[in-house]
């Protein structure tokens, strides 16, 4: 958009030529703009062009000296505010940049470049939801074709089926239309079809390799699809072109945290925090990385900074509570109570305040009021993430049907023979992080994190099963030949290789939900070690009830559901004890607390490892720890947590009833649990979703 009447004739041609040079040869565009200004001093379009060229040439301070007079002369020019926002971003003034870009779209809502720049700004600041909305508006306003405009309007309004129909029709007629392909990728992402979105964005880049905004979306999809190495390749490509790209740096920091490269990630976050000092979500991400790296006091400072920016940021308050060893003071509690009185907070923020207040009051021994807040928080959370206990029970029955003695006997010697992985699984809050910390203190074992690779493999198998008309991945697995099972094991090892930084022969995968996939693990990695971390039903379940999980674990927001889930877990583990005797080593949390040395010896014997004294001094291990127990496992074992649930016993009767006989037989299992599955039971069950908690 011109900021004043456009020049005519040769001057107009000169400006148009300079604009063509701007992104590919900014130095030549700068020279052209200066020549124009020699002929026509104070020509506004040429000045704006010069500011852009200087910015793209890495001369942000010089660009600022050019744009400042334009801001004074044309305070209502969206193009000027857009350029000032871009320059401010290059100068490391992220918050100023955000305000300038918002001013640009306020002045001219149909300015597509401003929406794209604003999307990048929000992503750099850690606000993915706002970034998604800004990107949708960019797509809407960058479309000039009526068909694409209609599809983009539907996308902005979140009318996803309508947008998808319009885009399919468009791509049927013009399959190489990159604008339509990119919009379809956004539709796929909104629908959770991340693999489809990934393939569509890859197609965009084949057609137009310098489509940088599509490349950034592509990197995000790769990150969501648990392909960190591929995501880093795309991000490094972007950063070679534009090293100051804040949104790419933020995404790279997130990917590096997933791969365990915390020092590099923290350096990126430090630069971003300096650039965006008033962004609460960015401060929160920085706090998470600091916490995982073992820098607790620094993480507290980061969380406090997020709260100072936005006192209603429930996630920051919960993050303090989730340190477990942190204690709120009276002023904190008063401020949290005040925030709960607000009517403008989203439901997830309210839930996080409830969980944080529950923890604060628990530390003050106000157990009845504490329980009320935990219960309110769980009720809010359950409204957001509905859960059907019958579906989970059906999956357990199906697993017991497929994974029989005959199934495994017919596959002896099948799978990838590598002994490298050690799977620690069970329920969340069962002591698995303690076991991981003990084992990773051994010189031959590397602790990584809760790796999503097994669950990713089950998702791909479910897609194949659905395409083949089968009702579950278990049914598909039963049809796979030996070479495919070995290939799946090799795929797991390949995908987890990026997590292994220390070159140790063994590594730990501590995803708790993998207990549902023991049959798969044994079929594809028959020499991997499997450790069941088990904690008493009341202690484990109530500890889960007090926990606000970022994702998955949807069973944990109701006492009855928790009890049923625990009972299903016990039944499934008893089944594998029967069909694969000795395959799984069980560590009972209370026994580990009472007789640590004997339990550690037994654990190391199972893993085929010689005893090392460092395993008893696990709390001195300074490795990164991601889970909610990160600060607890950096201290010696203490017994206080074993029966802590008893403070809340008056309100836990629904949990006891749901647990039934499992409760009285712990650490054993009820006799009925060991019965073989009735072969006449049908293989499909009403209400099954096919989904798995992640």
Image: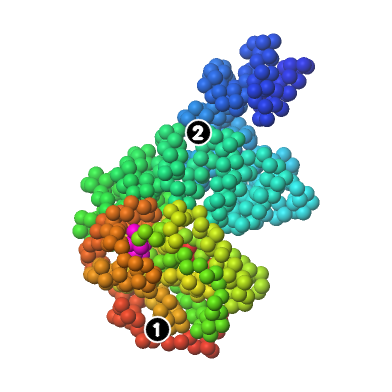
Question: Dot 2, crowdedness within 10 Å: few (<14), some or many (≥20)?
Answer: many
Q: Nearer the viewer, mark 2 or mark 1?
A: 1
Q: Is residue 602 visible?
A: yes
**Magenta span:** 432-441
Q: Establish if 387 lies above or below 247.
A: below
Question: Whole-percent x and y of residue 575?
Answer: 44, 81
Compared with 413, 228 (above or below) is above
Give the image location of residue 542, x and y in percent: 31, 66
Is label 2 in a helix, a strand or a loop? helix
Report which residue position mark 2 lands on.
98
Residue 181 appears at what percent x and percent y?
69, 49
Task: Identify the residue at image location x=26%, y=71%.
Answer: 598
Report whether residue 649 is seen: no
Q: Residue at x 75, y 48 (%)?
A: 176
Instruction: Give the camera-side residue of 368 and 625.
Output: 625
Marks 2 & 1, CB-CB < 8 Å contact = no
Q: Give how far apart the Cα atoms at labels 2 and 1 are.
A: 59 Å
Q: Relative to 197, say whether 402 is above or below.
A: below
Residue 155 covered by magenta stretch: no
Specify whether residue 435 is painted magenta: yes
Q: Callout 1: 10 Å neighbours few (<14), some, many (20+)?
A: some
Quadrant where the N terminus sits is top right
Q: From this viewpoint, which residue is outermost toward the left? A: 365
624 in relation to 580, above or below: above
Q: Mark 1 points at which residue?
A: 673
Lateral position of residue 309 relative to residue 4, left or right? left
Q: Which residue is drawn at 73% across and 24% down?
A: 16
């Amino acid at each position: 958009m011109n900021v004043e009447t456009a020049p005519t004739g040769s001057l107009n041609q000169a400006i148009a030529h300079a604009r063509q040079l701007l992104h590919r040869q900014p130095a030549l565009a700068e020279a052209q703009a200066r020549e124009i200004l020699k002929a026509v001093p104070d020509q506004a379009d040429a000045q704006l062009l010069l500011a852009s060229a200087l910015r793209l040439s890495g001369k942000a301070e010089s660009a600022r000296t050019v744009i400042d007079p334009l801001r004074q002369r044309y305070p209502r020019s969206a193009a000027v505010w857009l350029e000032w926002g871009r320059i401010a971003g290059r100068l490391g003034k992220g918050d100023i940049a955000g305000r300038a870009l918002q001013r640009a779209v306020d002045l001219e809502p149909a300015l597509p470049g401003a929406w794209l720049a604003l999307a990048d700004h929000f992503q750099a600041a850690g606000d993915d939801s706002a970034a998604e909305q800004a990107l949708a508006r960019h797509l809407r306003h960058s479309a000039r074709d009526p068909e694409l405009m209609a599809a983009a309007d539907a996308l902005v309004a979140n009318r996803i089926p309508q947008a998808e129909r319009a885009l399919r029709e468009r791509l049927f007629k013009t399959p190489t239309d990159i604008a339509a392909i990119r919009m379809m990728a956004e539709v796929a992402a909104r629908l959770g079809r991340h693999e489809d979105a990934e393939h569509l964005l890859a197609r965009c880049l084949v057609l137009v390799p310098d489509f940088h905004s599509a490349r950034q979306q592509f990197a995000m999809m790769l990150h969501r699809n648990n392909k960190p190495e591929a995501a880093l390749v795309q991000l490094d490509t972007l950063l070679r072109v534009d090293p100051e790209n804040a949104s790419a740096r933020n995404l790279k920091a997130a990917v590096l945290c997933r791969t365990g490269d915390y020092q590099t990630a923290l350096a990126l976050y430090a630069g971003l925090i300096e650039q965006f000092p008033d962004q609460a979500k960015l401060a929160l991400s920085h706090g998470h990385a600091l916490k995982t790296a073992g820098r607790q006091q620094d993480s507290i400072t980061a969380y406090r900074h997020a709260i100072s920016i936005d006192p209603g940021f429930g996630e920051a308050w919960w993050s303090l509570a989730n340190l477990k060893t942190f204690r709120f003071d009276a002023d904190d509690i008063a401020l949290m109570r005040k925030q709960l009185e607000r009517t403008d907070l989203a439901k997830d923020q309210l839930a996080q305040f409830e969980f944080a207040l529950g923890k604060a009051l628990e530390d003050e021994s106000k157990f009845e009021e504490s329980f009320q807040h935990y219960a309110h928080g769980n009720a809010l959370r359950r409204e957001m993430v509905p859960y059907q206990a019958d579906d989970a029970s059906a999956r357990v029955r199906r697993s017991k049907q497929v994974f029989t003695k005959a199934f495994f006997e017919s596959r002896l010697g099948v799978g990838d023979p590598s002994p490298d992985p050690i799977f620690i699984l069970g329920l969340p809050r069962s002591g698995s992080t303690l076991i991981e910390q003990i084992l990773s203190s051994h010189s031959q074992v590397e602790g990584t994190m809760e790796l999503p690779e097994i669950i990713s493999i089950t998702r791909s198998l479910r897609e194949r099963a659905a395409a083949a008309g089968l009702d579950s991945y278990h049914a598909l697995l039963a049809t796979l030949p030996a070479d495919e099972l070995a290939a799946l094991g090799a795929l797991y090892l390949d995908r987890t290789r990026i997590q292994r930084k220390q070159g140790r022969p063994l590594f730990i995968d501590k995803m708790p939900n993998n207990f549902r996939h023991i049959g798969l693990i044994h079929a594809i990695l028959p020499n991997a070690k499997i450790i069941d971390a088990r904690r008493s039903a009341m202690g484990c379940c109530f500890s889960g009830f007090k926990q606000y999980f970022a994702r998955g674990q949807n069973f944990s927001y109701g006492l009855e559901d928790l009890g049923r889930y625990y009972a299903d877990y016990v039944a499934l583990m008893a089944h594998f004890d029967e069909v694969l005797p000795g395959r799984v080593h069980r560590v009972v949390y209370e026994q580990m607390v009472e007789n640590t040395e004997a339990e550690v010896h037994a654990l190391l014997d199972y893993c085929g490892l010689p005893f090392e004294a460092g395993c008893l001094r696990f709390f001195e291990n300074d490795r990164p720890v991601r889970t909610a127990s990160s600060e607890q496992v950096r201290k010696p074992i203490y017994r206080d947590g074993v029966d802590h649930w008893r403070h809340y016993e008056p309100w836990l009767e629904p949990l006891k009833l749901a647990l039934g006989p499992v409760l009285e037989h712990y650490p054993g299992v009820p006799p009925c649990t060991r019965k073989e599955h009735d072969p006449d039971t049908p293989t499909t069950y009403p209400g099954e979703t096919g989904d798995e908690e992640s």
